[in-house]
Image (spheres, grey):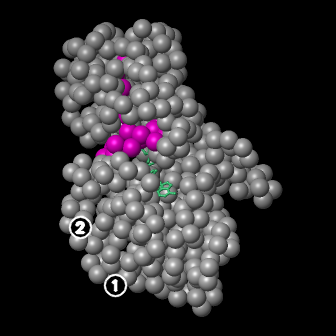
Amino acid sequence: MVKICCIGAGYVGGPTMAVIALKCPKIEVAVVDISVSRIAAWNGDQLPIYEPGLEDVVTQCRGRNLFFSTDIEKHVAEADIVFVSVNTPTKTQGLGAGKAADLTYWESAARMIANVSNSNKIVVEKSTVPVKTAEAIEKILTHNSREIKYQILSNPEFLAEGTAIQDLFNPDRVLIGGRETPEGQKAIQALKDVYAHWVPEDRIITTNLWSAELSKLAANAFLAQRISSVNAMSALCEATGADVTQVSHAIGKDTRIGPRFLNSSVGFGGSCFQKDILNLVYICECNGLTEVANYWKQVIKVNDYQKNRFVNRIVSSMFNTVSGKKIAILGFAFKKDTGDTRETPAIDVCKGLLGDKAKLSIYDPQVTEDQIQRDLSMKKFDWDHPIHLQPMSPPASKQVNVVWDAYQAAKDAHGVCILTEWDEFKTLDYQKIFDNMRKPAYIFDGRNILDVEKLREIGFIVYSIGKPL
Ligand code: NAD
Ligand code: UGA
């Protein structure tokens, strides 16, 4: 029986390993983490992350061939294949601060593997890492090896939150990079054999290590670039009277462009797009490729511009001040179907409004008050350095009120902002919301999910990104 251990029980490690366990009943999978509370939650009734379909997969396998544990050393020592899926946040201090990936968590995992191993192992990079990380990991492992042989593989993950289980069941591709030596190829084959339990062979791509590492950064950069492109167009649409949803539809019909990922928004969020592009920019700069670095930097700049533009639109519409005015924020997660708030555009929008002294009433079906208060009190880039940097109970802001109902959020508000595209926001009773708001009543749709004409008939003043005013 093959044994797999995954270090890091987060948004990637948890769902990925649960699906491997489900699809490969003869493989024993242990997911380990330094966070005692996270492991307790994986073993309890309330999983630590909200992801459609995840609970079903976990309950089918947990205790059978899927285990969650804090006994990291034991499970690593016993494993044939060790996945490393720890966080790789942006560095906050020192060389490359604000851009480079912080590999502290990765390095400590690698050193621990070297310390506890007493049999040969395949070590798989699941985290998103800078190109050439495998070389550094190889050095750490071989210099501490005590006769043990390691093969390093790069197997980046492409799942998106909210659709993680679907993405894992039916991936567009699985990418495995390894050394071009016979041992490297043997290791690639061993990992291929795991995925081949459910992924068609022609969707399992193998490359050298550096291509696999770079492809992950490239994929995220291309995806984010598409959103910044459509968001840049949204500003031009507003200036000219064009409608960005019509433009997206028209260009998406070109099969070379394709229809997906062309939704204009208040800006992209999530734990990875910004971090991975900053990492790519840093690698380009380190290689003297200034023009290439500047090209990708622009994707982030347009994203920041889009978030600022949204805040400015709100403030300028409301007679140039929101001071003391109640504004309802509907949606705080970075996208629908997740409770994840990492780098959510809602943080920047809320901070912008708070800076103008607005009173916010926030509702999101999956995000807790604690999380929202913590996000709004944290400095940029601190959020993904969980253990030592996050204040345990941040001071609750008097300007921020978190409620459990959209109607309550909007009651007596001057404006409503849609910041996450939750389906339930499409079917709210907007007449009721209007009746209970201050007048003039504004709606700012940062996700283009509402029927602008209907809202205008009710009496709202509506701003929808990239649409005629
Ligand atoms: P996460 O923060 O949710 O999970 C990482 C976990 O690793 C945490 O629970 C942390 O406690 C644990 N950890 C850190 N150091 C450890 C150590 N030395 N030993 C044991 N556990 C340790 O992060 P995530 O969202 O799962 O992302 C993990 C990696 O996957 C990142 O590199 C990210 O870029 C990449 N990725 C994320 C997604 C996504 O949708 N979130 C998708 C694809 C790739
Ligand atoms: C993204 C990628 O889609 C995954 O392939 C990748 O594995 C992952 O990053 C990662 O490396 O972490 P994720 O961030 O979970 O996945 O979610 P996306 O669906 O990509 O959305 C990212 C952000 O872009 C969200 O804020 C979303 O609302 C926004 N978005 C997305 C738009 O504004 N417009 C779109 O058309 C699509």
Q: Name the residue beneath numbered marker 2.
A: 63
Residue 165: where, in percent of width, then height?
31, 61
Q: Nearer the viewer, residue 172 or 198?
A: 198
Q: Quadrant of the N terminus?
A: bottom left
Q: Is residue 83 visible?
A: yes
Residue 1, numbered label: 1
Q: Residue at x 76, y 53 (%)?
A: 285
Residue 453, numbered label: none
Mark 1 vs 2: CB contact within 8 A = no
Is residue 340 located in the magenta-colored stretch of the structure?
Answer: yes
Report the magenta residues as a range: 327-346
Q: Is residue 231 visible?
A: no
Disc 2 is placed on an element classified as loop
Residue 381: where, in percent of width, then height?
57, 39
Residue 435: where, in percent of width, then height?
21, 14
Name the amino acid, label 2.
Answer: Gly
| Rendered view: 307 above or below 99 | above
| Rendered view: 334 above or below 144 | above
Q: Residue at x 34, y 20 (%)?
A: 401
In the image as oriented, which residue stretches furthest toward the right? 288
Name the amino acid, label 1.
Answer: Met
Q: Nearer the viewer, residue 264 or 351?
A: 351
Residue 304: where, in percent of width, then height?
57, 35
Q: Is mark 2 within 8 Å of ligand 1?
A: no
